Amino acid sequence: MVQVQSIPTGTVKARIVSIEPIGTTVTYDIGVYKNHNFVANDVLVHNCQHDAAASMAHLHNVLEPDFILGLSATPFRTDRVKLCFDKVVKDAGIHQLVQDGYLSRFEHFNVDNWNPETVAERYCAEPERWGSSVVFFHAWEDCLKFKDILRSREDEIVARLREFRPDLALRRSLVESVRGGGTKSDYDDRDELLADFRTGDVAVLVNCMVLTEGFDAPNLETAFVRDSMKGPTMQMAGRAFRMHPKWKNEKDETFKFKKVVQSGNTRWPILKTVMADRQYTWQDDQWRSLTLNPHIESINKAARIAISMVNVDLPKWMTDRAKKSQPNRRFGNQNSASPAN
């Protein structure tokens, strides 16, 4: 039941006074296309780092909520504007969530430069390694160039994927580009495209920023993260931190580790936020591991114990020299008379 109050300004204020279940029905959100009316006593804000924006301030003034609960993986802003929340209920960093098993473990790959040619070459060389991937670039022109390169080699890439990755159906295409904004038809096409990506009918999505937030696809295996700062980097890489269903539900080792690819020029390597299980860099036309041997500590310990148990006799010339170098100790006459007073 909704209680309605008219205000002389012509605005209508409404509050929810009771809720009765009516079963399953279609649910709309504030981002739905065109105009809709909403009634709410409280507000739950996802990606609440945007709550400092003027549009959110207007929304708070209109709804006048009793409570606002904010959720965010990046609770900070580069412009240093403070968020309006009074209390932190729970602070769980990405690194801790990975260690505790809530988010997926991952491998980190480093390339020299971030441009369409380099990124496309790395993907085309081993498409079966990367699997379902999302690729980010700064400019839309770079997105289109990357897509054109992959489509020019689509036959050979699809052949490799069908041989080594039969789990990818690829019924629609190998690669598609995703752009924000547009008409309702554009939104519908994008939703259909994302649905095809989740089912494996599209293997690669390339975009600028539209897939950094609000895009949830646990089947995504690799995030190719463009050079950026802390917040955007965490959002882009975070697309790959959802556990793959085949690992979460079936413990298929093939999907145990997700992958994040960055360049060495980025201002914020994701390794500053969360540690990868394995690290690789592209060198001499191959991936070289930067990860220490996981048994290095036990090897060192065994070596120290073995060395300590070895009996070593010093050479005779060293012992003779040591004896000769010992200083003569002279002691005073204990019976000598005390000095006269």
Image (cartoon, helix red, strand yellow):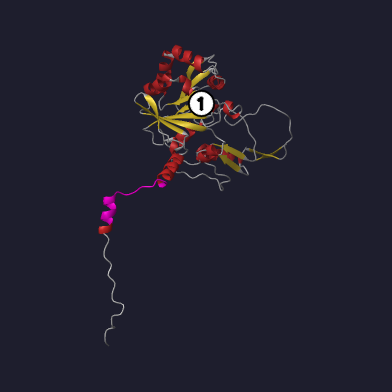
Q: Is residue 201 above or below residue 292?
A: above
Q: Residue 27 location, x and y as percent?
A: 65, 29
- Which quadrant is home to the N terminus? top right
- Type of amino acid at the residue the image marks with label 1: Glu
User: Residue at the location (53% across, 14% down)?
Assistant: 172
* Residue 331 horizontal side relative to residue 303, left or right: left
Q: Residue 107 location, x and y as percent?
A: 47, 31
Q: Is residue 152 above or below residue 105?
A: above
Q: Residue furthest bottom?
A: 341
Can residue 115 be seen in this snapshot?
no
Rendered image quadrant of residue 297: top left
Residue nearer the viewer, 232 or 283: 283
* Residue 319 colored in magenta in the image: yes
* Residue 323 horizontal side relative to residue 11, left or right: left
User: Residue at the location (48% across, 19% down)?
Assistant: 176
Number of numbered discs overlaid on the protein picture: 1
User: Residue at the location (57% across, 26% down)?
Assistant: 252
Q: Which residue is mark 1?
A: 221
Q: Is residue 211 above or below residue 5?
A: above
- Which quadrant is home to the C terminus? bottom left
Rendered image quadrant of residue 307: top left
Residue nearer the viewer, 92 or 22: 92
Residue nearer the viewer, 25 or 322: 322
Question: In this picture, which residue range is highlighted in magenta?
Answer: 308-322
Can residue 148 be seen in this snapshot?
yes
